[in-house]
Amino acid sequence: MLISVLVIPISIYSIGYLKKEYLEKNVSVLGALYQLFILSMLLVICSGNGFQFIIFWELMTLISFAFVIFDLKDIDSQKAGFVYLLMTHIGSAFLLFAFLIFAKYSDSFSFATFHGISNTMPSWLKLILFLFILIGFGTKAGIIPLHIWLPEAHPAAPSHISALMSGVMIKTGIYGILRFIFNFLNPFPYWWGEILIVIAITTAILGIIFASTESNIKRVLAYSSIENIGVILLPIGASMIFFSLGQKEFAALSLIPALFHSLNHSLFKGLLFTSVGAVVSSTHTKNIENLGGLIKLLPKTALLFLIGALSISAFPPFNGFISKWLTFQSLLLLFQVKFESIKLFAPIIASLLGFVSAISAATFVKTFSGIFLGMPKTHKATHAQEATPFMILSMSILALLCLLIGICPSIVFSLIKPISFSIVGLDSMTITTFSNLSNLNNYNLFTNLGTHVLSASSPALVFILLIGALCLSYIVVKSFGTKTPLRKEETWSCGVKPKPEFGHTPKGFSQPLGVIFSELHTPESFYHNYIYLPIVNGLISLSHKLKPIQSGILQVYLFYIFLTLIFCLMWLRL
C-alpha cells in the first residue's frame, strides 16, 4: 500500500517534470528504469525466500544507483553514486551473512523455515544476527552513522526519483527490521529495544541538526528523512520492549505510530520533493541563498510546499501531527513496564523527541521563507515559472491526502491496527476487544481513533470548529472592521531603495543552531574525522603490513594454497 499510494501521484508528476527538465536527455531509458525500480521494490517485499530477497534487494540498489549517476557529466553525481553503491553493498554483505546463518540452522533459505529457528541458537549468535540485521537494513534506512550515502544520493537523483527513494525505498529497511526481529528472532531480551531507541533518538537529533544548517534544498529534505527514520524507529523500540516482556497488547499499540508515520512520511516527503523539483526545474539552483520571493511567481507551488512543511512539522490538522502525537504516547506507555530504569528512560526520550520536533519546525520555517518569501536574490529567481499542470495535479493529490489523513485518521488507523497486531502475533479476537481493556483506558487517543470518528478528541471535529472560527472571525472583521482607507507605501529602509540583501538570510536564521552545535553541524568533519577516516586509515595500515605476503614468488603462493587445503580438511573432519 505504501509503495502504490506514493507511486501513483509521482507517476503523474513525472509526465510534466520530464517534459520540463529532461527533454534533452534519454527519457525512454529513464522511464524504463523507473518502471523497473517500482517492480524491484514490490518484489523485495513479496519475497518469501532469502535467496530471492537478496537478488531483488540488489536489483533495487543497482537501479537506484543508475538514477543517482544519471547525469554523467556531473562529477558530484558520480561521487554520490560511488558512496551509495559502497555503503549499500556493505549493508547487503551483512544481510547475506545473516541469511547464511539462518539457512545453516533451518537447512533452507525459505522465510517460512526461519520462524522459531532462533530458539535453537545460542544467545550470543542471536545478538550477532540482531546487529547484522540492524546494519544491513539500517544502511538502507539511513540510520546514523550508516547514513552518509543518503544526503549525497537523494540530491543527485531526479526529483521524482528522490521522492520515491526517500518516501518508499528507505522504508524497505524498516520493513526488514520489523519482519526479521519480530518474526525470526523472537524471543529476544528487552534491552534490544533500548538499543534501538538510543539509535533512533540519536538518528533523529543529528539528522534534524544537519538539516537545519543546510543550504541545499534537497539535502535539507534528505537529512530530514534521516530524522524521520529515527522517529519511526522510536515506537518500534518501545514495541520490542513490551513484546519481550510479554505485554503484546502494548507492543501492538506501540507499533501503530511507526506504521502510521511511515505512511505519513511517504506522503509529505513526496510532496516536499516534488515541490522542490518544481522550484529547481524553474530556477536551476538548489541553493536556498540564491532564491527568495517565489511566492508571487509560483503561488501554487508555494501553497503546496507550505502544506508539506506544516505536515512534516507536525502542525495540526495535518497528518504529521497525528503520528508524532501517537509516537509520544507510545513512549509514555513505557510507564506500564516494571523496570524503574525504563520508566526514567521514557520521559527523557520523549523530551528529546520534543526537541527534535521544535528544530524540525524551525528548519522548515527557514526553508519556506528562504525560497518563497522576501525578495528574489538572483536573476534566475526573478524569471521563475509555475509548474506544469501534471506536476500541480500530483502535488495537489499528495497535499489533499496529508490533510484528509490529518482530519480523519481513523480510516488509516483501521487499516494499520490489524497489521500491528499480526506482527506481534495476536489473533483477530484480540484485535476486536483490545479497545475495551481496562488497563488501556488512560490512553484513549489510541482507542478513540479506532472506534469514534467524531469523539471529543476527534481531529475532524477540531478541524470543523477551527474552520468555523476562522469564517466567523472573517465575517466579524468585514462587518465591523474599520472603514479607514488603506495607504500603501514602500518599506522604509533609511532612504535607500530596499534590496534583497537587506533581509534575513536562511543562513543567518540557522546560525544560532550552527554555533550551539558547532562540533556536529558539519557532518563531513564529524563523521569523516571520528568514524570513517579512522577505519580507512586502519585498513590502509593493515594493507601495508600485509604487503610482504605478496612476494611475487609462485612457490610461496602454492605454499599458501597447501596450508589452506590442510586447514579446510581439518575443519571438515571436526
Image: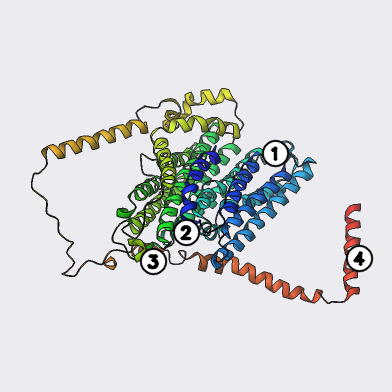
Q: Nearer the viewer, residue 362 or 76?
A: 76
Mark 4 or 2: the one toward you = 2
Decide: is 122 above or below 286.
above
Q: CA distance from mark 3 to mark 2?
A: 20 Å
Do residues under tags 4 and 2 come within 8 Å of each other at their CB atoms?
no
Mark 1 or 3: the one toward you = 1
Q: Crowding at label 1, few (<14), some or many (≥20) Cα neighbours within 10 Å?
A: some
Tell me the amino acid under the disc marked 4. Phe
Tell me the amino acid under the disc marked 3. Val
In the image, farthest residue toward the front: 24
Q: Position of residue 520 (x, y in %)?
A: 47, 64
User: Which residue has dot 3 on it?
Assistant: 515
Q: CA distance from mark 1 to mark 2?
A: 35 Å
Do residues under tags 1 and 3 come within 8 Å of each other at their CB atoms?
no
Q: Crowding at label 4, few (<14), some or many (≥20) Cα neighbours within 10 Å?
A: few
Decide: is 145 above or below 235.
below
Tell me the amino acid under the disc marked 1. Gly
Do residues under tags 3 and 4 come within 8 Å of each other at their CB atoms?
no
User: Which residue has dot 2 on it?
Assistant: 219
Do residues under tags 4 and 1 come within 8 Å of each other at their CB atoms?
no
SS of the residue at dot 3?
helix
User: Which residue has dot 4 on it?
Assistant: 562
Do residues under tags 1 and 2 come within 8 Å of each other at their CB atoms?
no
If you read the primary sequence from the N terminus, does the residue marked by circle 4 or circle 2 appear first?
A: 2
Mark 4 or 1: the one toward you = 1
Q: Position of residue 265 (x, y in %)?
A: 47, 45
Tell me the amino acid under the disc marked 2. Arg
Image quarter hosting the N terminus: top right
If you read the primary sequence from the N terminus, does the residue marked by circle 1 or circle 2 appear first?
A: 1
